[in-house]
């Protein structure tokens, strides 16, 4: 099964001290986070998969997470330009836990939500093909 990831429904450990920060982040989303949540992910079970907001995983909080696919969506605002190395390291650590990370910029979401939707549909489809349940 070359290129296929075997998924065991497992709990991804997380730093419990991040729970309160994640809760605060959910209460204060950015414009881009609101837009993708309300127009694509919330209660719509995107492509039949449920996403949750501001999920602690390991020592990080991801913006949106689908546990069934081990799939996270990150929204990169202006501050991410100054933390490229941090984002790369963070993605590598989460990838080692089996989590696929997809990134969109604020600009992409605010100015091209239809394009984000189409791209996300493709990426979720690709992820489904990678997994064996």
Image: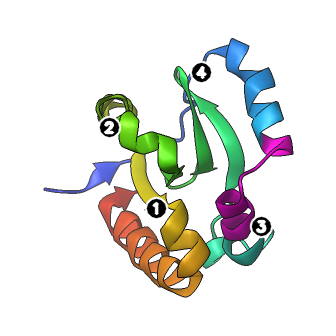
Q: Seen in the image, is 21 located left or right of residue 81?
A: right
Q: Is residue 125 magenta?
A: no
In the image, residue 45 above or below residue 73: below
User: Viewer-proximal residue, 8 or 29?
Assistant: 29
Residue 72 in percent (x, y) is at 51, 50
- Label 3, label 4: how many angstroms apart (C-alpha)? 23 Å
The residue sitting at 82% across, 44% down in the picture is 28
Please name the predominant secondary structure of the magenta segment in the image: helix
Q: Seen in the image, is 14 located left or right of residue 26?
A: left
Q: Which one is closest to the eye, mark 3 or mark 2?
A: 2
CB of mark 3 within 8 Å of CB of mark 1? no
Residue 105 in percent (x, y) is at 47, 60
| Label 3 Cα crowd, 10 Å radius (few <14 / some 14-19 / many 20+) | some
Q: Is residue 98 visible?
A: no
The residue sitting at 56% across, 71% down in the picture is 109
Q: What range of the chain is rendered magenta? A: 26-37
Counting residues from the start of the chain, the first of labels 3 and 1 encountered is 3
- Residue at the extreme left of the image, as rendered: 2
State the residue position of label 3: 42
What secondary structure is found at the residue carrying circle 4? Answer: loop
CB of mark 3 within 8 Å of CB of mark 2? no
- Label 2, label 4: how many angstroms apart (C-alpha)? 23 Å
- Label 1, label 4: how many angstroms apart (C-alpha)? 24 Å
Residue 117 in percent (x, y) is at 54, 80
Counting residues from the start of the chain, the first of labels 3 and 2 encountered is 3
- Give the label on residue 84, or none: 2
Counting residues from the start of the chain, the first of labels 2 and 4 encountered is 4
Q: Which one is closest to the eye, mark 2 or mark 1?
A: 2
State the residue position of label 4: 14
């Amino acid at each position: 099964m070359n290129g296929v990831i075997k998924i065991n429904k497992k709990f991804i450990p997380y730093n419990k001290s991040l729970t309160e920060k994640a809760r605060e982040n959910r209460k204060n989303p950015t414009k881009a986070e609101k837009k993708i949540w309300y127009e694509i992910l919330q209660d719509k079970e995107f492509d039949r998969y449920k996403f949750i907001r501001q999920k602690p995983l390991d020592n990080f909080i991801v913006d949106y997470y689908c546990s069934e696919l081990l799939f996270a969506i990150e929204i990169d605002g202006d501050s991410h330009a100054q933390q490229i190395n941090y984002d790369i390291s963070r993605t590598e650590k989460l990838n080692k836990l089996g989590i696929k990370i997809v990134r969109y910029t604020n600009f992409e979401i605010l100015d091209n939500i239809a394009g984000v939707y189409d791209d996300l549909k493709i990426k979720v489809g690709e992820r489904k093909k990678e997994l064996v349940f």
